[in-house]
Image (cartoon, helix red, strand yellow):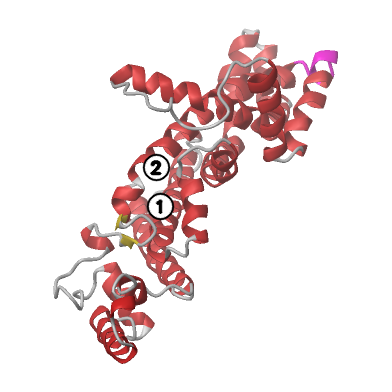
Amino acid sequence: MSKYILKRLAYIVVVFFVTSFLMFSLFSLIPSDPAKNQLEGVKKNLKPEVYSQMYQDLREKMGLDDPIVVRYARWMGFMPDKMSGEFDGILQGNFGYSLLRQKPCIDVVKVPMQNTILLNIFSTILTLLVTIPLGIWCAVHKGSKLDQGVQAFTILGYSLPQYIIALVFIFVFAVLLRWFPVYGAATPGSTYTGFREFMDRLYYMALPILVGLFGALGGMSRYVRASMIDALSMDCIRTARAKGVKERVVIYSHAWRNALLPVITSIIGWFLSVFSGSVILENVFGLNGMGSLYIKALNGRDAQLCLAIQMFYTVVALLGNLITDLAYGFVDPRIRVNK
C-alpha cells in the first residue's frame, strides 16, 4: 500500500506541474498589465515620454517581457524573483498579488475558502444522510407505490437546473414562509464570535444547503438504489437469506458492502463537483465563497487571483482521485493496490 501511495503522489506532483503550467500560460493571455496598473496613479503627472520610459523599465524589472517558461519558473518559485532576488513563488507560499483587491491572494481567499468549505461539508453530510438511506429503502421496496413516488419526485432534482431550484426555494422559503434569509453569508453589522458566529453563518447557508440537497436527491439516491438492487440479486445474498440471516444484517452488512464499491466513485466525484457547482449557489445567494470570487476575478481580469483559485480546484481534484483509489482497497479487500 505504501509503495502504491508513493507512486500516486509522484503522479500527482507531475500532473500538478503540467496543469499549473497550462493554467499559467492560459491566464497569461488575459489582457492585464501589472506594470501599467502600478503606474496608473502617477501617469497623469508625467510627460508621455517619461511615462513610456518608466513603463518599459518597470516591465523589465518585473520580468514581464521574459519567455513564458521563465515567468512560470519565477511564479512557481524555481527561480528567484527579478525584483527582490529571492525565491518567492507558490512553493514558498506566495500565491501572487491581487490587483483587484490590492493585497496578497492568500489573504483574499481565506474567508471565501472558509465559506465554501463550510457550505460544501454540510451539503455533503446532509445529502449523504438523506440519499443513502433513501436509496437503500427504495431498493429493498423496489416497485412499491412509495418507491415509484420517490423516483418521480427525485427526478425533478435531477432534471431541473440548479439556479431554477434556487429561485423556487427562495420564493417558497424566503418570500412566502420567511424562514431563511435570501442574500449574504452573515447578519449585516453583526459582531458575533465563537459558536454564535458559527450558527449565524450556518443559518444564512441553510437555504443554499437545502438547494444542494434537492439537486442531489435525484442523482445520488437513484445511483444508490441501482447499486443496491444489483447487490441484492447476487447469489451470496440469496445464500445468506436461505441460511436464516436476519434481513437487517443481509441488507446493511452484506448487500450494502457489495453495493458500496461503485457508489464510492459517485460519492467522492459528487463531493468534488460540489466545489465547482457552488459557483452557481454562491452567486445566486450572494455568498462570499470561492465560486463567486472566481467570477469576480475573471470579470476584473485579475490573473494572479484566478490562478490561485484554479490551483485550489486542481489540488482538490488530484487529492480526490487518490482518495477514491485508496477507498476501493478499504471497502473491498479483493482489490489490491500493492503494485
Q: Specify the farthest residue to the left.
A: 85
x, y percentage for residue 196?
35, 17
Mark 1 is on which residue type?
Phe
In depth, the one of 135 and 238 nearer the eye is 135
Element at label 2: helix
| C-alpha span from label 1 to label 2 | 9 Å
Pick whichever, 53 or 255, lies toward us: 53
Which stretch did the figure color magenta?
A: 141-147
Residue at 43% across, 28% down: 186
Sooner in the amino-acid sequence: mark 1 or mark 2: 2
> Is 88 left or right of 149, judged from the image as shown?
left
Horizontal side of residue 210 vs 32, given as left or right: right
- Residue on which disc 1 sits: 312
Residue at x-position 72% and y-position 37%: 164
- The residue type indicated by label 2 comes to Met
Residue occupying the point 32% across, 88% down: 52
Residue 223 in view here: no
Q: Find the residue positioned furthest to the bottom.
A: 49
From the viewer's perspective, is 80 left or right of 256? left
Residue carrying label 2: 113
Q: Is disc 1 in contact with disc 2, using a CB cutoff of under 8 Å? A: yes
Q: Residues within 10 Å of mark 1 (few under 14, many from 20)?
A: few
